[in-house]
Image: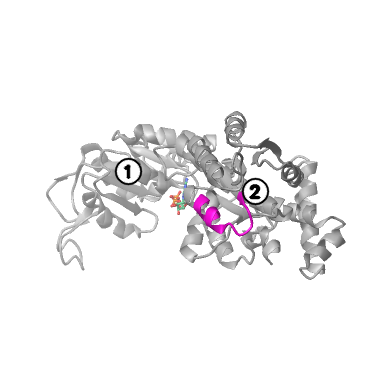
Amino acid sequence: MEKILVVDDDLGIQKQLKWSFAGYEVIFAEDRASAIAQLRRFEPKVVTLDLGLPPDPANATEGMATLEEILELAPQTKVIVVTGNNDKKNALRAINLGAYDFYQKPIDSDTIQILVSRAMNLFNLEMENRHLAAVAPSMDKIIGQSESILAASRKAERIAQTDISTLLLGESGTGKEVFARSIHEHSLRKDKAFVAINCASIPENLLESELFGYEKGAFTGANKTTPGKIETAQNGTLFLDEIGDMPIGLQAKMLRFLQERVIERVGGRSEIPVDIRVICATHRDIPGMVAEQTFREDLYYRIGEISILIPPLRERNNDVVLLARTFLAQYNEEFKTKIKGFSEGAIKAMSQHKWPGNIRELQNKLKSAVIMAEGTHIQAEDLNLTFNNDALSIDTLNLREVREHAESRAIRNAYQIAERNMSRTAELLGVTRPTLYSLIDKYHMDDIKTG
Ligand SMILES: Nc1ncnc2c1ncn2[C@@H]1O[C@H](COP(=O)(O)OP(=O)(O)OP(=O)(O)O)[C@@H](O)[C@H]1O
């Protein structure tokens, strides 16, 4: 159970807050010394702190000192300061010192519950981010905590400082290019060029001149000598995406370049030495192509001195949610929107979906959801991923999850029937208003709260 520390010397308020925070483990302290002792002992994520503490409850000095001490000891703690009515000046001072939010007496259960639940969510999110930074301090562009992606990142990190030819394998949209760039950025060539070329997107007859360059007059239209991508990557990294689509005729020339590290431009006679690192990627089954003789075996061994398998999104456990949160923050900034998060249904739907287009598909769905969403939280429908109720089965969901899903749907229906009137909604559902608010909060239905 999540812990909250309530620092207040008024027993009546302590009792009231204990009742309000029914879903949490509530710890109490009545002055600065006991607050710090409880903070050390229980490490609560959220603290509510009355600024008027003994020995001088009429003044905020002791409260402020307590706030400073808490933030010095555990800066990640979310402190909500509680002030007397009309004491905005001290509330703002506290925020300046680093308090998460403030709250003016008299205490209203519904509001303080919402404040605390938000603070808790923020704390958890920040903790997740810190954890992430600690796990992958180096390959920081590769977001993911699943064992499979961490294993791939570790392998990439180990080979980054070498010049070993690397083959990145994985379905489309899994992040092969992100890996290639990260390897480059962690290599000794990081200040030199990173040049990417997609072998599948360039017509066969143009690919050779695109890669190797051409001399003036080499063919009709070759008006001036032009260096190719390989030369442009001199001293840096060349990323050959979709290498499995390289025409067999060009593979021999490619092999010579990789073995001898010299190239000849199309129509040229002189050899140009090149010093570059090569990273290749493909979604194809190259050993199968070797067996069918559509890919040269010697080239396969040359490009894949080491290979890294980038797992598909459906095999990355909770990475979907982690990536979704990251992209949501990016898109909020890009589109100037203020979507706060995802409904439980949306999270469930994202976790259930198989993501054939991998991360790119997730990005596309999120982008349109951010633009189209009407509430403060993205719903499964906004993502065009309906959470399939019929798919509820005992091997994927437990009774609690089934109940939660049904509850949130019932709340939504009642809210519509009650024409957005909260008292009437609570009445229809046969619960009290505080219970309704805590359920709305639990299921992140903020659009209802503000609707
Ligand atoms: N681990 C990751 N963390 C954050 N963003 C990622 C990650 N992996 C991929 N992306 C993002 O997902 C999108 C697709 O990634 P990328 O282009 O690298 O995939 P790919 O495997 O090279 O795809 P394709 O084979 O279709 O070219 C990009 O916008 C990229 O920024």
| Res 321 label | none
Task: Magenta stretch: give its range.
Answer: 82-94
Farthest left residue in view: 270
Quadrant of residue 156 within the rendered picture: top left
The residue that label 1 is drawn on is 185
Farthest bottom residue in view: 419
How crowded is the residue under tag 1: few (<14 C-alpha within 10 Å), some, or many (20+)? some
| Res 116 label | 2
* Tags 2 and 1 touching, CB below 8 Å: no
> As shown in the figure, which amino acid type bears the numbered disc 1?
Glu
Position of the N terminus, as image quadrant, is top right
Q: Is residue 416 above or below residue 117?
A: below
Task: Measure the C-alpha gap from mark 2 to mark 1.
Answer: 41 Å
Quadrant of residue 88 within the rendered picture: bottom right
* Residue 39, position as x, y percentages in the image: 59, 33
Q: Is residue 366 above or below residue 7?
A: below
